[in-house]
Image (cartoon, rainbow, N blue to C red):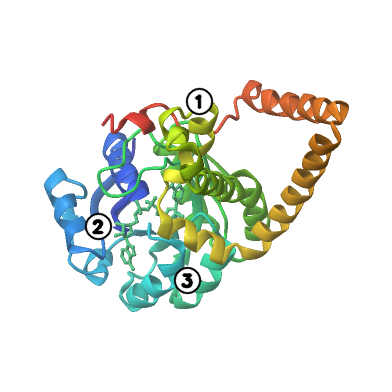
Amino acid sequence: MAQQYEKVALIGLGLIASSMFWAMKRAGTVGEVSGYARSAETRATAREIGLCDTVCDSAIEAVKDADLVVLCVPVGVMGAVAEEIGPHLKPGATVSDVGSVKKAVIDSVGPHIPEGVHFVPAHPLAGTEQSGPTAGFAELFDNRWVLIVPSSDDTDDAAVIRLQAFWEGLGAFVERMDAEHHDLVLAVTSHTPHLIAYTMVGVADDLRRVTDSEVIKYSAAGFRDFTRIAASDPTMWRDVFLTNKEATLEILGRFTEELFALQRAIRKGDGDHLHAYFTRTRAIRRGIIEAGQDTAAPDFGRTGSKR
Ligand SMILES: NC(=O)C1=CN([C@@H]2O[C@H](COP(=O)(O)OP(=O)(O)OC[C@H]3O[C@@H](n4cnc5c(N)ncnc54)[C@H](O)[C@@H]3O)[C@@H](O)[C@H]2O)C=CC1
Ligand SMILES: O=C(O)C(=O)Cc1ccc(O)cc1
């Protein structure tokens, strides 16, 4: 494949950045990849495992001469990183990100992007519950969606098309979406489910004394499947909820109403209500699988890297 960017800089070297690096190497679509992470320990690990062609000791050094800079840090620190690198970006370069929330990233990063640099936010709908520089693998984005969320109506079309081709080279399907819609859709499909999974583990833990650790010992497939995502990084998810507050609260409100209705049906012994509800929701869930839109993490995400 032809070279799409001569130099790419990855800021933050965790699951997503490391997967991007291995996928870029597999695709052979970029010249050089530089990387930076805040912690010296992460940078040392990256150097040890050959993650990035050059691991830099500052974000400013990493973005020097880069044609594409991808912010791969938790959503809450994207603005601060952009402020630091803003004055050092190459004219004509593109700055993108992989954050799980889009409106807050546009608001916090946008003001720090200088004239003549393109800002094209994006979000790969692919990940696992693992984090850190050793968690990545080249196949993570294969056949997964990446949503490109242009930051304004006058975002340079050529920069968007180039970023789209880049992600397609990493194995993904790409679509464009506006930020507000993105944040609502993700609140339903990803953010609220993570919150509920964290809560379920918390409930199981609260019951530990009563059940004498049996919840963990005998954890049935349902509990395991349902709570896998509760092993995800706490910093990342704290930031998601703090920055996608409105949409998450809207979905949580609806969720609570449905839960109360089911609670009431159980209390009243209303089997018809329960049966009708489960019949409807089973059909929807099966429809998602049949349409090939099941977004469960691929198996290799659970068993470690396959690179
Ligand atoms: N984990 C997942 O499944 C997915 C995550 N995302 C998004 O991707 C982004 C990165 O997530 P992961 O790779 O999973 O996280 P991670 O926890 O694996 O990696 C984050 C990296 O950022 C570094 N970092 C933190 N603060 C920093 C700062 N101020 N300056 C420089 N580096 C800093 C950390 O040291 C770490 O290397 C987040 O914004 C997240 O919302 C998007 C799709 C999926
Ligand atoms: O591990 C899983 O199943 C996920 O849902 C991963 C994930 C987490 C956050 C995102 O913004 C996108 C994907």
Picture coordinates of residue 179, whole percent (x, y): 62, 59
- The residue singled out by tag 3 in the image is 109
Badge number at residue 104: none
Is ligand 1 within 8 Å of the beta carbon of the residue shown at mark 2? no
Three-letter amino acid code at the position of disc 2: Gly
Q: How far apart are the two marked residues, 2 and 3, measured between alpha carbons?
A: 19 Å
For image coordinates 67% across by 64% down, the residue present is 246
Tell me the distance, in whole angstroms, between the alpha carbons under discs 1 and 3. Answer: 41 Å
From what the image shows, is residue 301 above or below residue 231? above
Residue 156: give x, y in percent of width and height.
Answer: 53, 62
Question: Which residue does the numbered mark 1 point to in the structure image?
Answer: 221
Q: Which residue corresponds to mark 2?
A: 35
Instruction: For marks 1 and 2, give the CA distance.
Output: 39 Å
Q: Identify the residue at horizontal 50%, vertical 59% (top origin).
A: 121
Q: What amino acid type is highlighted by mark number 1?
A: Ala
Few, some or many C-alpha atoms within 10 Å of disc 1 (few <14, some 14-19, many ≥20)? few
Secondary structure, mark 3, is helix
Q: Earlier in the sequence, mark 1 or mark 2?
A: 2
The quarter in which the C terminus is drawn is top left
x and y percentages locating residue 12 in the rendered image? 31, 59
Q: In this view, does 272 lie to the left or right of 194?
A: right
Q: Is residue 200 left or right of residue 43?
A: right
Q: Nearer the viewer, mark 1 or mark 3?
A: 1
Give SS at disc 2: strand
